[in-house]
Amino acid sequence: MAWSEWEQVVGDGLEFTEILYHKKEHLDTGAKVARVTINRPKQLNSFTAHTQDEMFRAFYEGSHDPLVAAIVLTGTGDRAFSTGGDVAWEQWGLREQFYWRYLPNRLPRNSRRPVIAAIRGYCIGGGHHLAYTCDFSVSTETAIFGQNGPRVSSPADGYIIPYSVSVVGAKKARELWMLCRRYTAQEALEMGLVNSVVPDDKLDEEVDRICEDIIKASPGCIEILKGCFDAEIDHLPQSGLQSSWQYHNYFDTEEGKEGSMAFMEKRKPNYWAIRKKQIESGQL
């Protein structure tokens, strides 16, 4: 199958500074594939509220183009697919805003087209669960996977937690989220986090192969099937403890601030020293 070259998508509301948005056409059928690229390589393709807004606009346009068969999601460069929320941005009093505007992991669910994560380098934290909520995930052999939230005092919430059980099973899901270990691409494949692992120079070829299989099928059937699979997400809690009254001020607590402060200061966090102080002062 032959493809046109990738071309930048232009139009009203499609001028971007933190992502790249392209499409290419399948020359035999006229079907198209859209590609959204997080373009913050110096920050390991971590995202801010602005990045999320741009991603939403690109996904919306691609999802509503009747000739688009699939959307590819990736990051600029070889160092990272994405490392999730930009900790430096979160640190400046925006962590609660980050939570309420946390759009990326909803993009695969809201898309009417299958979403393919093309993963190079680090796939960590918010970037990690963004990848495993995509319909398909393809990884290079050198990619690294894992969660990071508890280590930097950034609790996740909502369906992305129980949905991980559907992806890797209950025991592995708890391991992912609570132990914050790092996994190789081969380990991610064995766990079910990715569909396939390929040499670094074969990633685009493997993504094209998935797109070509999608194009061979009825687009209406693909859209119905995606909706059926995505319906599982709608039955999961869309928000949870973090948004309840017990935890809604978590980011304002000493513990809530400590993780990002330690990260910025390049030191180990002192969570248990904070907890001991709270016990001594009668707070716990």
Image: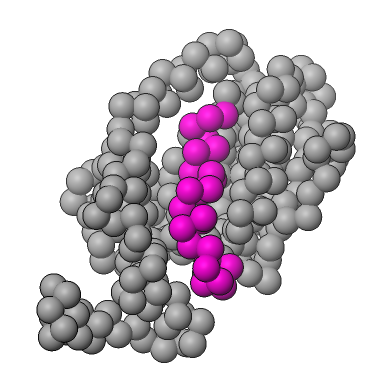
Our reading of the magenta stretch's main secondary structure is helix
Question: If the image is split into quadrants, where does the C terminus sit?
Answer: bottom left
Q: Residue at x 37, y 78 (%)?
A: 258
Question: If the image is split into quadrants, where does the N terminus sit?
Answer: top right
Q: Where is residue 144 in the image (x, y as percent from the top left)?
A: 46, 64
Q: Position of residue 13 (x, y in %)?
A: 80, 38
Q: Position of residue 249 (x, y in %)?
A: 35, 60
Question: What is the magenta range?
Answer: 88-111
Question: Who is closer to the viewer here, 127 or 254?
Answer: 254
Q: Which residue is drawn at 59% across and 26% down?
A: 113
Q: Which residue is drawn at 76% across and 43% down?
A: 21
Q: Is residue 92 magenta?
A: yes
Question: Who is closer to the viewer here, 152 or 239?
Answer: 239
Q: Is residue 239 visible?
A: yes
Q: In this view, does 232 lie to the left or right of 7?
A: left
| Up/down of 125 relative to 137, above or below | below
Residue 45 falls in image quadrant: bottom right
